[in-house]
Image: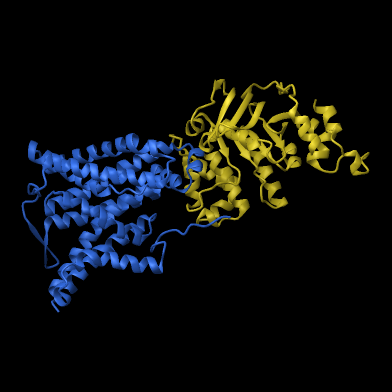
Chain colours: A blue, B yellow
């Protein structure tokens, strides 16, 4: 047993898992507020990462400014996408809405390839030092930044839904749209806001992953990885999304460890989360934290 | 029952209800027609007036269109594929039909929906804070304390609102309405599913709110007796129209109302033979 490698992979799993958790949260946010399963979540990462990359390489502005402008852009992007594409779909069958999001996913992916090419492009370096030492362990600074950002976003979500007026309004809308309207909440605003926040948070994850691996259309694969995380946690639970993300991240890396040490099958890394997903859904069909629907006759 | 429908199908001169009181009307509904899904006609020319600071009761049998009337006023009709196709609703001197429900709340009309509809996966406090969603002032905290004074029981309940008893949920629903500081509260069946004792308690609180805070209340009720005790004026609906209106006293003493809504009825009735509807025909046509 190579304990050192295992430890390294577990740390890696937590960092990647936290990012999965963040993206899963933004996926759940849209699902909860507007009951749309957004298959274009991965493309939000992609668009965010490319936007930030483009700003940094063309205008040579400091990273923090590029990052903030990207966030503002993604917020507007989310709102416009919701208003133009998804608002007319309200009241249509679920399958039509899903097809629309799949269409969006293909469209944006192709558009990004057309605009920026198919090859991965590295981000300009953000930090002076590549690695920092944490508890005697060498950690890449971008990984550390990624973990810190993930935790901040999660805490931010927690605060938002527990204490802010708009967060409460979003929960109310998720619970019952008619009740929300009777309280003076504009459901349209809530929908638009949920897409805006979701696009913005996904873009943060996109930029973080982009700084580590370089930006390429492979980024949108994150969107698919997020499904096991979301479904593990239960489609409508924010906490579940975080836990699901961490589980998927850890599973991947632990599977990678066993694969490389003992099995040598070669691709356990990719498929292990999906196997575990199937097993968990067999035992707990609503996911680990999902709410059971109460059937009223 | 057959005779009743017969009566309804013939157009009746609508009681445009000069609500007798000298108080100015806060809400006036003028000859509205409501259609669901573009085909189902539910309200056919309904008019009513709610004077400022009063409690007005809207009574009637199941399916008469009472809840629809409230939803037409609050705009929630829109969320159920219904629309006001004729007539108008004016509140505080402004025409409000066709406005989105969330904007109507901002104008000062708050509906407490049938079945309370509190948000069961939030705490009491969160429900109350949501009631104040449209407000921008900084007195929300004081108002929460005020609601706790009216309903001391709510303060003790710190868990999820879904675990409250039916009575407590109704109190929470009323408290949540107060948090919006509305000018007019539309209450749909506050007595639904409550024990007689709780019904009494809820109604005494409704009167207290009306008296202390000067909130105008339009009350839809099945429990006509309690409603007429609380209200100053009442309307009786049948199949989408107002068929009778008058002060609460007049209605409570009206033989037909006694017979059909209050139970008991006049002493002269000895057998069901006499309980024919020709009596109503005589009165309401």
Q: Is residue B279 visible?
A: yes
Report how many numbered discs are placed on residues in the image: 0
Q: Is residue A246 above or below residue A113?
A: below
Please indicate whether residue B154 sits to the left or right of residue A38 in the image. right
The residue positioned 70% from the left and 41% from the top of the image is: B62
Please indicate whether residue B210 sits to the left or right of residue A139 in the image. right
Q: Is residue A60 visible?
A: no
Q: Quadrant of residue A231?
A: bottom left
Q: Position of residue B103 (x, y in %)?
A: 48, 31
Residue at the outermost bottom position: A1
Q: Position of residue A17 (x, y in %)?
A: 24, 60
On-image quarter of the C terminus of chain B: top right
The residue positioned 82% from the left and 38% from the top of the image is: B258
The residue positioned 50% from the left and 45% from the top of the image is: B128
Q: In front: B146, or B84?
A: B84
Q: In front: B9, or A243?
A: B9
Q: Quadrant of residue B14?
A: top right
Q: Quadrant of residue A97?
A: top left
Q: Position of residue B199 (x, y in %)?
A: 69, 48
Q: Position of residue B16 (x, y in %)?
A: 70, 21
Please indicate whether residue A222 sits to the left or right of residue B2 in the image. left
The residue positioned 40% from the left and 69% from the top of the image is: A283
On-image quarter of the N terminus of chain B: top right
């Amino acid at each position: 047993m190579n304990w050192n490698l295992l430890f390294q992979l577990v740390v890696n799993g937590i960092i990647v898992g936290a990012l999965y958790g963040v993206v899963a949260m933004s996926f759940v946010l849209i699902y909860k507020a507007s009951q749309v399963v957004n298959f274009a979540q991965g493309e939000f990462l992609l668009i965010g990462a490319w936007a930030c990359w483009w700003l940094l390489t063309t205008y040579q502005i400091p990273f923090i400014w590029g990052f903030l402008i990207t966030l503002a852009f993604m917020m507007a992007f989310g709102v416009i996408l919701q208003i133009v594409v998804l608002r007319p779909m309200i009241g249509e069958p679920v399958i039509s809405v899903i097809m629309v999001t799949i269409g969006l996913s293909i469209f944006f992916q192709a558009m990004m390839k057309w605009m920026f090419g198919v090859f991965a492009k590295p981000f300009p370096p953000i930090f002076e030092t590549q690695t920092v030492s944490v508890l005697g362990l060498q950690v890449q600074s971008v990984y550390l930044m990624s973990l810190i950002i993930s935790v901040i976003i999660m805490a931010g979500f927690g605060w938002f839904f527990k204490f802010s007026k708009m967060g409460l309004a979003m929960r109310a809308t998720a619970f019952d749209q008619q009740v929300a309207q009777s309280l003076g909440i504009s459901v349209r605003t809530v929908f638009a806001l949920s897409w805006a926040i979701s696009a913005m948070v996904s873009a943060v994850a996109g930029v973080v992953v982009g700084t580590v691996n370089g930006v390429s259309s492979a980024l949108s694969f994150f969107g698919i990885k997020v499904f096991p995380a979301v479904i593990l946690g239960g489609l409508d639970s924010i906490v579940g999304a975080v836990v699901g993300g961490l589980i998927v991240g850890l599973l991947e890396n632990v599977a990678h460890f066993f694969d490389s040490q003992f099995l040598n099958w070669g691709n356990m890394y990719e498929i292990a989360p999906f196997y575990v997903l199937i097993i968990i859904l067999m035992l707990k069909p609503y996911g680990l934290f999902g709410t059971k629907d109460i059937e009223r006759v | 029952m057959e005779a009743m429908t017969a009566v309804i199908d013939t157009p009746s001169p609508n009681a445009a209800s000069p609500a007798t009181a000298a108080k100015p009307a806060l809400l006036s509904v003028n000859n509205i027609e409501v259609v669901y899904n573009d085909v189902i006609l539910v309200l056919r020319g309904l008019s009513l007036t709610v004077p400022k600071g009063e409690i007005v009761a809207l009574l009637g049998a199941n399916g008469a269109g009472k809840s629809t009337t409230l939803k037409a006023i609050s705009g929630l009709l829109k969320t159920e594929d219904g629309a006001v196709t004729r007539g108008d609703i004016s509140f505080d001197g402004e025409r409000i039909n066709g406005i989105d429900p969330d904007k109507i709340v901002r104008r000062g009309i708050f509906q407490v929906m049938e079945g309370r509809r509190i948000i069961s996966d939030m705490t009491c406090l969160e429900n109350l804070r949501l009631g104040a969603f449209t407000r921008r002032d900084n007195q929300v905290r004081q108002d929460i304390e005020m609601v706790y004074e009216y309903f001391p029981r709510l303060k003790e309940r710190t868990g999820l609102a879904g675990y409250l008893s039916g009575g407590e949920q109704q109190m929470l629903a009323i408290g949540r309405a107060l948090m919006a500081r509305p000018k007019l509260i539309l209450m749909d069946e506050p007595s639904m599913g409550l024990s007689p004792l709780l019904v009494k308690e809820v109604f005494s609180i409704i009167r207290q709110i009306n008296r202390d805070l000067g909130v105008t209340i339009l009350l839809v009720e099945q429990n006509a007796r309690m409603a007429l005790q609380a209200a100053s004026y009442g309307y009786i609906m049948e199949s989408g129209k107002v068929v009778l209106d008058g002060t609460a006293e007049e209605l409570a003493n009206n033989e037909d109302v006694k017979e059909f809504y209050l139970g008991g009825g006049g002493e002269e009735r000895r057998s069901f033979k006499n309980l024919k509807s020709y009596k109503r025909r005589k009165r309401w046509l």
